[in-house]
Image (cartoon, helix red, strand yellow):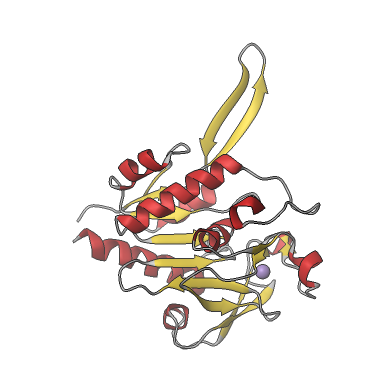
Amino acid sequence: MRKPIIALTPDQVSQELPVFGTITESGTNHWNIGWLQRNGAVPVIPAFLSDEDADEFIQTVDGLFVTGGADIDPARYGEEVLPFCDAREPERDASDIALIKAALKHDKPIIMICRGCQMGNVFFGGTLYQDIEKQTGSAINHRDYPSFLGEGSHEMLIVPGTPLAEMMDGETSFGVSSMHHQGIKDLGKGVLPMGKAPDGLVESWYIDNGVNYVRAYQWHPEIQAPNRHAQAIINDFLKAVRARMK
Ligand SMILES: [Mn+2]
């Protein structure tokens, strides 16, 4: 059987160079790329795509990885930009949404990490906190950047009876990293929580519509040192991908 080909949603970086002026490149980080490669998948990175091109492109791959990154434009969920909202990438928002729509239509499994977890919730009509600390007063530091390699930032409480409970083989909680500024406020239509931080913030969710595989995680299994919890998450995704390739 051939290896699964997984599309990664790109970010876009511009830099000023002598002679050429502004050079813009599309890409993603090597944590994302390496996680797929180590697990037997072939990563591919498209440019920012229109709805029409995303629909064409998605038919050439086996799954979609919606990656982490900058804040999402509050206009996407009908809110004004508050002063503590960080830098945004409206073109990326549009491309992410086009790829999610196409992947659902063509039944390509979707894994969503960090910003991806938030983007997916917004896609299904949910809303976000533009700054968790300022808007919820949570005692948890969700912007715990030094936590990135490990599982030591805060607990993830597993919602019983969900795919996450099944993945984690009967565990009721485990530790995660936490490197996010925004977070889920109101859940989108059909968005079902499967993991929550101790302050109640939904940090993992899934869709159960009888067709699509969609699993979202606010923390960073792709970055953390390989361990059982991170491995269970990528195994579950690639199992769903391979099942649809038969
Ligand atoms: Mn968190």
Q: Considering depth in this image, is 208 or 37 the residue closer to the camera? A: 208
Left or right for 70, reference 6: right
- Residue 97 shows in the view: yes
Number of numbered labels in the structure image = 0
Ligand 1 is found in the corner quadrant, namely bottom right
The residue depicted at 35 percent of the width and 63 percent of the height is 238
Residue most extreme to the top:
19
Q: Considering depth in this image, is 159 or 207 the residue closer to the camera? A: 207
The image shows residue 178 at horizontal and vertical percentages of 67, 66
Left or right for 244, reference 85: left
Q: In which quarter of the image is the N terminus?
A: bottom left
Left or right for 150, reference 131: left
Q: Considering depth in this image, is 119 or 190 the residue closer to the camera? A: 190
The image shows residue 147 at horizontal and vertical percentages of 69, 64
The residue depicted at 48 percent of the width and 50 percent of the height is 97
Give the answer, above or below, for where 39 lies relative to 162: above
Q: Quadrant of the C terminus?
A: bottom left
Q: Considering depth in this image, is 139 or 29 the residue closer to the camera? A: 139
- Residue 33 shows in the view: no
Give the answer, above or below, for where 127 lies relative to 89: below
The image shows residue 27 at horizontal and vertical percentages of 51, 39
**Quarter of the rendering containing residue 128:** bottom right
The image shows residue 244 at horizontal and vertical percentages of 24, 62
**Quarter of the rendering containing residue 156:** bottom right
The residue depicted at 49 percent of the width and 63 percent of the height is 124
